[in-house]
Amino acid sequence: MSRRRIVGHERQRAGLTRLLRSASLPSALVFSGPAGIGKSLVAKALAATLLCEDAGQDLVGCLKCNACRLVETGNHPDL
């Protein structure tokens, strides 16, 4: 899963970024819609951002830290 492959979902990503920046991310989110539109990519990008050791306040982790490498390979124990 590469967070750089997410295409579209600008409104949803902007909303999630706004929640991250304001530190008001709810404890649960529901990602719903038709199959194959990228819901899981956006959800995984958010999870990876939260797990990143050096993430900014957007939906892209640093892509260099140990947590990001584990997420990219699908081996992070919390994902």
Image (tube, grey):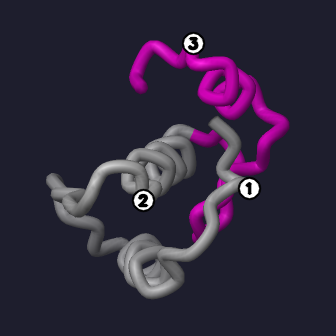
Residue farthest to the front, as pictured: 35
Residue 38 drawn above or below residue 76: below
Which of the image's four quarters has the N terminus? Answer: top right
Query: Disc 2 marks which residue?
Result: 37
Classify residue 42 as left or right of residue 23: right
- The spot of residue 7 in percent (x, y) is 63, 68
Q: Are marks 2 and 3 in contact (CB under 8 Å)?
A: no
- Magenta segment: 52-79
Inspect the magenta stretch and tell me whether residue 64 lies in it: yes
Query: Disc 3 marks which residue?
Result: 75
Classify residue 63 as left or right of residue 16: right
In what element is the residue under mark 2? loop
Front residue of 6 and 23: 6
- The spot of residue 62 in percent (x, y) is 77, 49
Q: Amino acid at mark 3?
A: Asn
Q: Which mark is residue 69?
A: none
At a point 26% along the width and 59% down the height, the residue shown is 34
Q: Which mark is residue 4?
A: 1
| Inter-mark Cα distance, 1 to 2 | 15 Å
Classify residue 8 as left or right of residue 40: right
Kindly indicate the quadrant of the structure image that contains residue 78.
top left
- The spot of residue 23 in percent (x, y) is 36, 72
Count the marks: 3
Front residue of 16 and 66: 16
